[in-house]
Every structure is written in structure tokens, then in C-alpha cells.
Amino acid sequence: MIYRALADLLVLLHLGFVVFVVLGGFLVWRWPRLVWAHLPAAAWGAWIELSAGICPLTPLENHLRQAGGQAGYTTSFVEHYVMPLLYPVGLTPAVQAWLGIGVMAINALAYGLWGWRRLSRSDRATGTP
């Protein structure tokens, strides 16, 4: 029972990490120091997708599920939990590459807009046209 609960908790943690990787750049607007946690997380998430790798949390979740008497799964976390929500077919390396590019593009937009806002504010404060 405890292993199943730990596996479920790990899924929530993993999902939260994925959301943070994709959208955390926008949180930096409110909490700028978060950049030091978000940039490595975003780099890791993009690398995992671009390399068609599997996050280490996936085998850990499978281990916990098996210890709790449940069946694990052989695919990645994204393919097992997220892809069924987005796509009716399985995850391919090409789709994973696009997901990695999407992570980088969303975060480039978030950080670009954040930097532009900071520069605009700085220019207004100094009176620079």
C-alpha cells in the first residue's frame, strides 16, 4: 500500500516538474530568483526529450509500483501519462524532438518577454528614450 502511494506521489511530483519545465519561465516574471532553479530544469527537460531519453523518475516509479504489487510500464513518463492526453498515437523520437523544441521555444518566449519588460522598466526609470 505504501509503495503504491509513493508511486502516485511520484507521478504528481513528476507532472509538476514537467509543468515547471514548460511554464516556469513565466514564474520568473514574478519571482526572478526562480531563474536559478528553472534554467537547469528546462535544460534537463529539453535534453531528455531531444535525446529521446527517459527521466530517472520513470524507473523509480515503476520500481515502486512493482514493489506495491502493480505492473510498471515500459515507456517514458511523457508517453505513458501525457501523450495519451495530447495525441492518440504513441510517442516517436520525432515527436519527442518536437516536444523538446517546444520546451525551448516557450521558454525563449518567456525569458525574452521578461528581459524586454525589465529593459523597458529600466529605460523608463532612467528617462532613456
Image: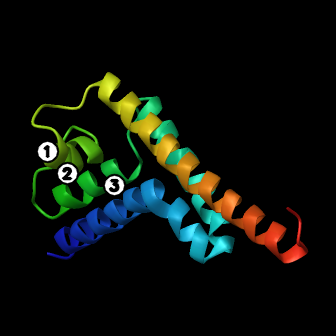
Element type at mark 2: helix
Amino acid type at circle 3 is Leu
Q: Earlier in the sequence, mark 1 or mark 3?
A: 3
Q: Are marks 1 and 2 in contact (CB under 8 Å)?
A: yes
Pick the residue in front: 74 or 32: 32
Query: How many tags in the picture?
Result: 3
Identify the residue at image location x=38%, y=31%: 98
Compared with 127, 61 (above or below) is above
Compared with 92, 31 (above or below) is below
CA distance for labels 3 and 2:
15 Å
Residue pointed to by mark 3: 60
Which residue occupies the extreme top position in the image?
94
Q: Earlier in the sequence, mark 3 or mark 2?
A: 3
Identify the residue at image location x=32%, y=48%: 59
Would residue 11 appear left or right of 117 to someone viewing this image?
A: left
Pick the residue in front: 84 or 122: 122
CA distance for labels 1 and 2:
6 Å
Amino acid type at circle 1 is Pro
Counting other residues with Cα less than 10 Å from the Cα at mark 2, is it few (<14), some (14-19), or many (20 or more)? few
Q: Are marks 3 and 2 in contact (CB under 8 Å)?
A: no
Residue pointed to by mark 1: 84
In the figure, residue 34 lies in which quadrant? bottom right
